[in-house]
Image (spheres, grey):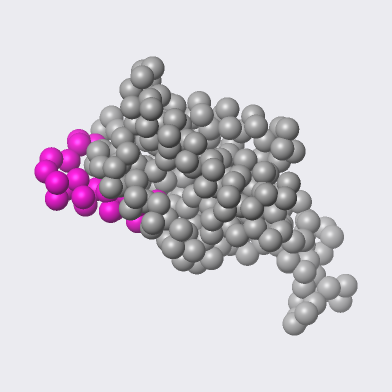
Amino acid sequence: MNGRQPGGLVPPPRLRRLTQLYAGLALYGFSDALMLLAGLGVDPWDVLHQGLSRRLGLGVGTWAIIVGAIVLALWIPLRQRPGFGTLSNVVVVGAVIDLCMATIPAPDGLTLRTIFLLAGVGLNGVATGAYIGAGLGPGPRDGVMTGLAARGHSIRVVRTGLELTVLASGWVLGGTVGIGTVVYALAIGPLAHVFIPLLRIDEPVRLATTGEVGTGEAERTVGNGEPGRTFGYPAGADPHESK
């Protein structure tokens, strides 16, 4: 055996994918916790989670899990198919947020709070590249965005509309909107633009009938073997738009 899969596919590095996925999700939860602990404002979805936590109880991470599960249910009418990474995203990020919030002391003083904020934003960008680059499925919120975009709507308009709606709802519920929210909004796009391609694990390569891969002889495919899709995003969508 030469390690090739039936159908002429070179198998992806599964252990590397899983390791990168869970490292990315854990780092994402840790980075979210740093921004929450800084108390200077967080990204729109965490404004919502924080607002729900303050209004109704339970931890911010627990609300991240609950909201993620609700959002994932919206995939059904949008005919989106979650990947293994999608389901893991719902649970792991929220669990890590609650763990970090319970064990890491909140910083004192503006300088330390600023360090927490900037570190959180930067690590969030790395985490985004890691878990999306693993190619095991987008996050539940990303899937709703791309599902709506696949129906002919601009991905930028859809994303902006979702983020503003979530942000406004979280703010009304008591979530923290501040300079950190602005910093995140300005920085996450460029960070994702760098780290998604940097940490991307190449998809399986369909071999030519000769069994050799050469220039122009290989067709890149994704999980279900369909060409023209990347990490669960519809053809033509920009994955760098993803959170």
Give the quadrant of the N terminus.
Answer: bottom right
x, y percentage for residue 100? 31, 36
The residue closer to the viewer here, 230 or 147, is 147
Left or right of residue 230: residue 186: left
Does residue 222 lie above or below 177 as drawn? below
Does residue 235 lie above or below 98 as drawn? below
Residue at 21 percent of width and 50 percent of height: 114
Residue at 59 percent of width and 46 percent of height: 158
Left or right of residue 103: residue 42: right
Stretch in magenta:
104-124
Res. 144 in view: yes
Residue 12 magenta-highlighted = no
x, y percentage for residue 112? 16, 48
Q: Main secondary structure of the magenta part?
A: helix
The residue closer to the viewer here, 111 or 162, is 162
Does residue 171 lie above or below 215 as drawn? above
Residue at 73 percent of width and 46 percent of height: 151
x, y percentage for residue 133? 55, 57
x, y percentage for residue 25? 46, 45
- Which residue lies most toward the bottom here? 215
Picture quadrant of residue 26: top left
Residue at 71 percent of width and 41 percent of height: 80
